[in-house]
Amino acid sequence: METKDLYNYFLQCAGIITDTRKITPDSMFFALKGENFDANTFASEALLKGAKYVVIDNPEYKTGDTTLLVNNTLEALQQLAQHHRRELGLPIIALTGSNGKTTSKELINAVLSKKYNTTATIGNLNNHIGVPLTLLSFTKETEIGIVEMGANHQQEISFLCTIAEPNFGYITNFGKAHLEGFGGFEGVIKGKSELYDYLSANTKTAFVNLDDTIQKEKTAHISRFTFALDDYNCDVRIEAVKADPMVTVKYNGLDIKSHLIGIYNAANISAAIAIGNHFKISDIKIKDAIEGYIPANNRSQLIEKNNNSIIMDAYNANPSSMSAALTNFLQLETEGSYKIAVLGDMYELGNESLAEHLKIVQSLENAEDTEVYFIGKNFYFNKTDAPHLHFYETYDSFKDYFSTLAPKGKTILIKGSRAMALERTLELI
């Protein structure tokens, strides 16, 4: 079936679904394949649950006119998304980066929605399936689309750009994330910069933080709209930033007080300010949007429990985000009470894993006013005898000890990779 024909069926539907457990009336179900499943086998079930059409790539499961046969369901989904994007013709902002993608996306969406009908990536639907689903959620009423792009290998961002065809792009930063897949830090820079390559080749515009020297150099010869705290030669000047512990950014004489923890979030806020400025959002509406944004999903949240102030940043971790979180945490002033850090292993670091975990351990050896609890095999391999550093190979062994502490009046940081699920630690406090 040709993409244009499939598109006519799509226009009759109420949305795209890839999971039969989430079927809604008159939706279009795409039968995608995974390592351990073939959704072609659920085609009839999807129709029974209310799908208007199902898209399959195995002719054995064709049952009638409501079953649409294509050569490859994943490719059909991607091509349909690209076609839909072209039909709508709306401006799209793509963003990627090692850290802060989702927070930046939410802030940008909050700011732009003050003036425009915006649609943004939901959750972390940012891969070769998520980006098409995001694009297909855009409607004729959508005035600006915001698409988050994730990657852990070369050429992934490039491929996602060919589907989304963004008019604007923003890279939050280059950090030590997915080192194994990208082939080291230089590989991260190359992989993420595929967004810049696309923008340059298609005469589109990049939003650039000029305080990031690598990005400043990489975008010197492409169309860009810039912001900075330290570099005065920019389009949008950030006058000051501070974290106590919530981040405040000063812009055009306005103190914008966020609900985000950590000075590293100042760049995310600044990007939203700059993009709002570019799209002619008034300063007061930018301020209202950022101050009204409440983080969720274990990202830079401040939680009060049993008289403890808990910085919950357990959604994910890599060496760059871990170092930034610790730098911020260690400089926080507390009233005579020592601090506690609960840190979990960082994943997808390949051959550099043990060395990167060792760097984190070494960075905390002199932080004697902070009790640090390291959890996971990589941290445990690098255990030391420093009395304020505690090492546990498994979460269960940590749990057995930590559950007896019952901390009160402490400032506590919780951070680790998603697979560590360190939000469980809340139950022990």
Image: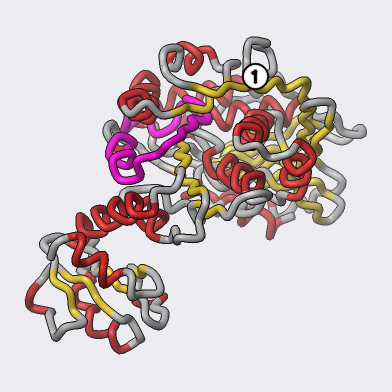
Name the foreground residue: 251 vs 428. Answer: 251
Q: Residue at x 37, y 26 (%)?
A: 203
- Tell me: residue 181, above or below residue 121: above
Disc 1 crowd, CA 10 A, few/some/many (<14, 14-19, 20+): many
Residues drawn in magenta? 157-184
Indicate the position of residue 173 as horizontal and vertical percent values.
51, 27
Query: Is the C terminus in the top left, top right, bottom left or bottom right quadrant?
Result: bottom right
Query: Is the N terminus in the top left, top right, bottom left or bottom right quadrant?
Result: bottom left
Residue 246 shown left or right of residue 159 in the figure: right
Q: Residue at x 76, y 25 (%)?
A: 241
Q: In what element is the residue under mark 1?
A: strand
Q: Is residue 161 magenta?
A: yes
Three-letter amino acid code at the position of disc 1: Ala
Is residue 192 something that shows in the picture?
Answer: no
Indicate the position of residue 208 as horizontal and vertical percent values.
53, 23
Furthest toward the bottom, the residue is 48
In the picture of the structure, the residue carrying the numbered disc 1 is 228
Q: Residue at x 46, y 11 (%)?
A: 217
